[in-house]
Amino acid sequence: MSGSSPAPILRLPLGFVNAWLARTDGGGFVLVDTGTPGDWARLTAGLAAAGCTKETLRLVVITHGDFDHVGCAKRLRSEWGVPVAAHRGDLGLMARGESPARRGATPLLRLLMRLLPQRKADPDAPGSPLFMPDLLLEEGQRLDAYGWDATVLHTPGHTAGGIAILTAQGDLLVGDTARGGARPGVGMLVQDADAYDATLARLSALPGAVAVHPGHGDSFPAARLPGRLPDAARPKRN
Ligand SMILES: [Zn+2]
């Protein structure tokens, strides 16, 4: 493979959630998201199958602080010695297990949210996945230092500290800002509808984006990104 060929983004399916593995310059890798705490065996098997080792994994990037994306981050850091990077907007979720007020994107989800008990998190419990990132990512930050020709975009809405990564090849990793599949949609939960709308408007008009790689479901063409929240996801104003 020549040094100038596009770096493929590899999907590591972990049950209902995806992690994405990017091959970087110099034979390294960057992992985006880490599944739930129960996904360790599947995640490490996927990394091994891709030829990614402790020595070649340069960085773990977290798209947002939900448990199904940060689950194995702390363990990767302690057992593989890899730094973990995320946006400061989700520190409460990642470091302290705080659940900010969020509403379901559909009436059915809103009903389910009312019925589900709130998750109580204890950072000191044995095996707790709660952690403090080693590196805080900002809007516009470049990842060349890790061999990856890619840029961080701050994409609040699903959570306050959500990010997307846009690569030079046009791969757009969006976390739960969008959901994949035959009919791409938005994430299941909304923390801030106005911020979410602004994020969707920005991403759906983003120059250079070709393929979207979501936190759940299959990749899809960037032209199919939703441009705004569906009305059902919007709080009623009166
Ligand atoms: Zn998720």
Image (spheres, helix red, strand yellow):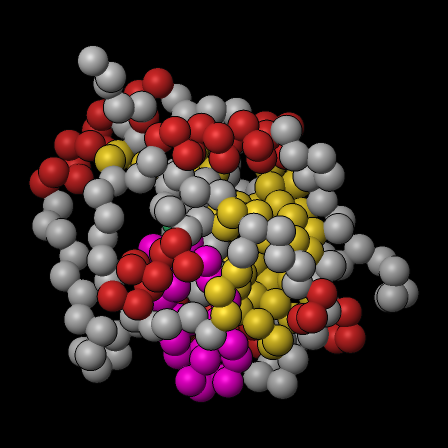
In the image, residue 112 above or below residue 10: above
Measured as percent of width and height from the top left, residue 72 is found at: 39, 71
Is residue 35 one of those drawn in magenta? no
| Image quadrant occupied by the N terminus | bottom right
What residue is shown at x 45% (from left), y 80% (from top)?
77
Q: Is residue 158 above or below residue 97?
A: above
Q: Residue at x 20, y 79 (%)?
A: 124
- Count of picture labels: 0
Quadrant for the C terminus in the image = top left
Q: Does residue 206 lie above or below 84 as drawn?
A: above
Seen from the viewer's position, the closer of residues 37 and 152 is 152
Residue sitting at x 49%, y 43%:
155
- Whether residue 191 is visible, yes or no, is yes
Give the x, y percent position of residue 147: 72, 69
Identify the image quadrant of residue 222.
top right
Q: Is residue 44 left or right of residue 4?
A: left
Percent position (x, y) of residue 224? 59, 28
Is 50 displayed left or right of 200 in the figure? right
> Which residue is outermost to the top?
238
Left or right, residue 234 beside residue 226 = left
Of residue 62 and residue 100, the one placed in the foreground of this image is: 100
Front one among 140 and 186: 140
Q: Nearer the viewer, residue 3 or 198?
A: 198
User: Residue 158, how many percent across, how many down?
Assistant: 38, 41
Residue 17 seen in render:
no
The magenta segment is 64-87
Relative horizontal placement of residue 5, taking residue 225 as reference (left or right)? right
